[in-house]
Image (cartoon, helix red, strand yellow):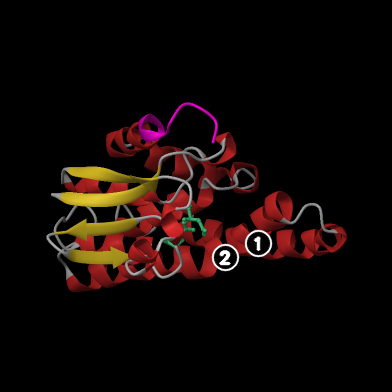
């Protein structure tokens, strides 16, 4: 049985955003059953977890003693077992991998910089000065992505792939930013309207402990 790690509690603002959602979504697209290994506060820093995830983050993927961390690697690994995520055709498959890497390497860091300034560094005087340029850089990436998507339903055309799964989860981190491009907003809505996404989101939200930390 596949097991993924997730937090048993996070603050309200993070619910529906924690990165185990990506893996739950990929597993739902692939039709693979899984269970969640829920981490209590501090479990991620215990040596036994750090031995599996060097940065103390969720998620990890475990199956029959095989362990993997990093959502990009995990989603691609799941994609090996499902054409719903990675097409068989070699070139289409390479393009799907290209979009996975673009999501995680060329778009996510710029969005996360703005999130860090707004959420985690907001009390630092310098963060107010850094924000406009961080926002401009993020916007430049989104403008490039919007132009590449154009009026296609998905990044590589008519077919949803692992690249769309990762890109949609990145774009929904800052919906207000994404909303500045009508085609990107419609794209995220299209991806997240998939029944597999809804099942994954419901599962993540259902696994959180209801009480405060
Ligand atoms: N690059 C990692 C990022 C994972 C990540 O940021 N996980 C967050 C939850 S969304 C986490 O565990 N944060 C706790 C921490 O960094 O200490 C991946 O994609 O798997």
> Residue 203: where, in percent of width, then height?
32, 34
Tell me what residue is drawn at x 32 percent, y 58 percent.
60
Q: Is residue 3 left or right of residue 10?
A: left
Based on the picture, tell me whether residue 38 belongs to the magenta stretch: no
The number of numbered badges drawn on the structure is 2
Residue 133 visible here = yes
Magenta-highlighted residues: 205-213
The one nearer the camera, 65 or 128, is 65
Pointer 1 residue? 113
Is there a contact, CB below 8 Å, between mark 1 and mark 2?
yes
Q: Is residue 108 above or below residue 158?
A: below
Q: Is residue 126 left or right of residue 26?
A: right
From the image, give the main secondary structure of the stretch colored magenta: loop
Q: Quadrant of the C terminus?
A: top right
> Helix, strand or loop at disc 2?
helix
Q: For the residues marked 1 and 2, what is the alpha-carbon distance in whole angstroms? A: 6 Å
Q: Give residue 166's position: percent from left, percent from top.
A: 40, 56
Which residue is outermost to the front? 47
Q: Please report the residue visible at 24 percent of the width from the left and 65 percent of the height from the top.
A: 67
Image position of 110 with respect to 209: above or below: below
Q: With 199 as the anchor, is 90 left or right in this view?
A: left
Between 198 and 23, the one lying in front of the other is 23
* Label at residue 109: 2
Residue at image coords 49%, 70%: 105
Can residue 57 be seen here? no
Q: Ligand 1: does it lie within 8 Å of the C-beta at label 1?
A: no
Question: Residue 206 got which mark?
Answer: none
Question: Residue at left 26%, top 58%?
Answer: 61
Mark 2 C-beta closer than 8 Å to ligand 1: no
Q: Position of residue 137 (x, y in %)?
A: 69, 65
Does 87 sit left or right of 8 as displayed? left
Seen from the viewer's position, the closer of residues 3 and 95 is 3
């Amino acid at each position: 049985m596949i097991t993924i790690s997730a937090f048993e509690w996070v603050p309200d603002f993070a619910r529906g955003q924690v990165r185990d959602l990506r893996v739950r979504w990929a597993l739902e697209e692939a039709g693979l059953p899984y269970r969640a290994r829920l981490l209590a506060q501090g479990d991620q820093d215990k040596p036994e977890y750090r031995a599996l995830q060097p940065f103390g983050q969720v998620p990890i993927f475990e199956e029959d003693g095989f362990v993997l961390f990093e959502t990009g690697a995990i989603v691609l690994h799941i994609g090996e077992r499902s054409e719903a995520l990675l097409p068989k055709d070699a070139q289409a498959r390479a393009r799907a991998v290209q979009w996975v890497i673009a999501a995680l390497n060329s778009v996510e860091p710029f969005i996360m910089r703005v999130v860090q300034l707004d959420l985690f560094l907001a009390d630092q005087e310098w963060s107010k000065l850094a924000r406009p340029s961080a926002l401009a850089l993020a916007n430049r990436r989104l403008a490039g992505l919007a132009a590449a998507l154009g009026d296609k339903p998905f990044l590589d055309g008519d077919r949803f792939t692992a690249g769309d799964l990762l890109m949609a989860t990145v774009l929904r981190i800052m919906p207000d930013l994404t909303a500045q491009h009508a085609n990107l907003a419609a794209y995220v809505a299209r991806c997240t309207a998939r029944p597999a996404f809804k099942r994954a989101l419901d599962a993540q939200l259902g696994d959180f402990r209801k009480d405060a930390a």
